[in-house]
Amino acid sequence: MKHDVNPYTPPGDVGSELPALRTAKKHRGPLLYFALAGIATAIIAVPLIVPRSLAVKDDPNPIGYLLILLSMPVGGLVFRLRSRKWPIDRTVRKRQITACFATLLLPLSVGVLTGLRGQGLHMTVLSGVVSLTLMAGILISGLRRGRNVA
């Protein structure tokens, strides 16, 4: 660069040496719907999970835990209904498969950390069930994505 050139003046030619910056496409996905469905079902499930009395050792109702697990596929269905008029995004399936493989890291890491003897097997199976419901929610959500075009 020459010393007498003002660095604040725009270049004269359009094809300057600097490459044009690409704007990143932002796709709105079902994560917000998973979170909202999870919060709603957690609020509904609190009376089922909390024991009736702390003095008497009541076991919590397992239906409350089942409701929380079902919130992920329900969130995927709500997203699918909400996005039925949005355009189909061809890159979604690859990202969904990647996210499904990432959810498999939960039971694998629990299995490695706890081992498969004693209570470790139960923890691994439960984390596998959570992983499967999350994968179901991801796959149920469909291929439609709304784009934030700026």
Image (tube, rainbow, N blue to C red):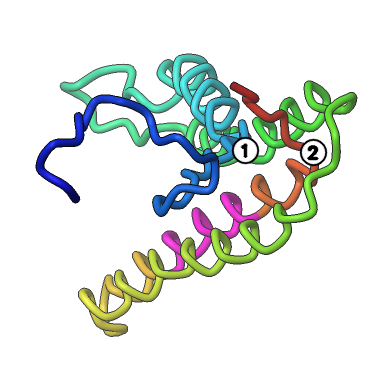
52 lies above or below 110: above
- SS of the residue at dot 2? loop
Q: Amino acid at mark 1?
A: Leu
Q: Position of residue 135 (x, y in %)?
A: 61, 56
The residue that appears at 50% across and 40% down in the rendered structure is 13
Q: Which residues are magenta?
A: 125-135
Q: Residue at x 50, y 53 (%)?
A: 130
The span from disc 2 to disc 1 (Cα, nearest Å) is 22 Å
Q: Residue at x 38, y 75 (%)?
A: 108
> Would you identify the image quadrant in which residue 14 lies?
top right
* Magenta residue check for 127: yes
Label 2 is placed on what type of residue? Arg
Q: Quadrant of the C terminus?
A: top right
Magenta span includes 118: no
Say the numbered circle drawn on residue 70. Answer: 1
Q: Mark 2 sits on what residue? A: 144
Q: Main secondary structure of the magenta part?
A: helix
Q: Is residue 6 above or below residue 18?
A: above
Q: Nearer the viewer, residue 86 or 73?
A: 86
Quadrant of res 76? top right
Q: Secondary structure at mark 1?
A: helix
Outermost residue toward the right in this view: 85
